[in-house]
Image: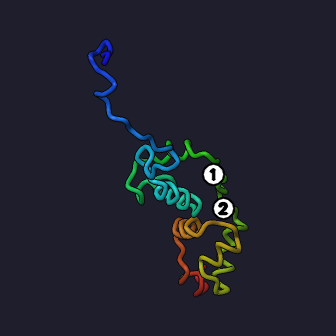
Amino acid sequence: MSKSRRGHSKDDFIEVEYTPLAMVSRVNGWTKEQIDEMISLYNQGISIRGIAQKMKRTVRAIEHRMARLPVALPPRKTRYTDAEVREIIRLIKQGYNIREVSTETGRPYYSILEKLKNLGLNKTLIKNGLV
């Protein structure tokens, strides 16, 4: 049996079967379930910082992973217009819950909650006509 320059023969090595990347459940520290959760949280309107906190990852890790996704995430609507805020308040006064308001306005559930919180509003204040 001939030996290589490093003194090894073919018999010294173990044959290893390689698994295609698509079959590996964890890639670069991320499982498919974690990636799906990250995308779901993003689509619900949760901020990058909020996603990082929920997933116990750094903001940079979330940003980096999102940038490497094979598909582009849909752009988020940015700021609420005054008309959108008035519409949200009107719907809540009519008895809609936040999920229904989300469906009607096309805004993510958590985005609406965050907006109401930032305005210092809650459903009770709105329903009682204090807004």
Quadrant of the image for the C terminus?
Answer: bottom right
79 or 5: nearer the eye? 5
Residue drawn 66% across the image and 69% down it: 85
List x then y, in percent, for residue 37.
50, 60
Name above or below for residue 58 compared with residue 14.
below
Q: Residue 93, how many percent across, how many down?
A: 65, 84
> Is 5 positioned to the left or the right of 38 in the image?
left
Callout 1, which amino acid?
Leu
Mark-to-mark CA distance, 1 and 2: 20 Å
108 vs 22, left or right, is right
Mark 2 secondary-structure assignment: loop
User: Is residue 48 found left or right of 101 in the rendered image?
Assistant: left
Q: In the rendered image of this protein, does residue 84 appear above or below residue 24?
A: below
Q: Residue at point 26% right, 16% down?
A: 7
Residue 41 image position (x, y, % from top left): 53, 61
Q: Residues within 10 Å of mark 1 (few under 14, many from 20)?
A: few
Q: Which mark, residue 96?
A: none
Compare residues 114 and 15 and report the one nearer the observer: 15
Residue 66 position in % (x across, y down): 54, 47
- SS label for mark 1: loop
| Outermost residue toward the right in this view | 83
Placement of 70 over or under 85, stated as above or below: above
Label 2: how many Cα within 10 Å (few below 14, some 14–19, many 20+): few
Q: Amino acid at mark 2?
A: Tyr
Quadrant of the snapshot with the N terminus: top left
**Residue located beneath label 2 in the image:** 80
Mark 1 and mark 2 in contact? Answer it, CB < 8 Å.
Answer: no
Farthest residue, direction top: 5
Tag in front: 1 or 2: 1
- Which residue has dot 1 on it? 73
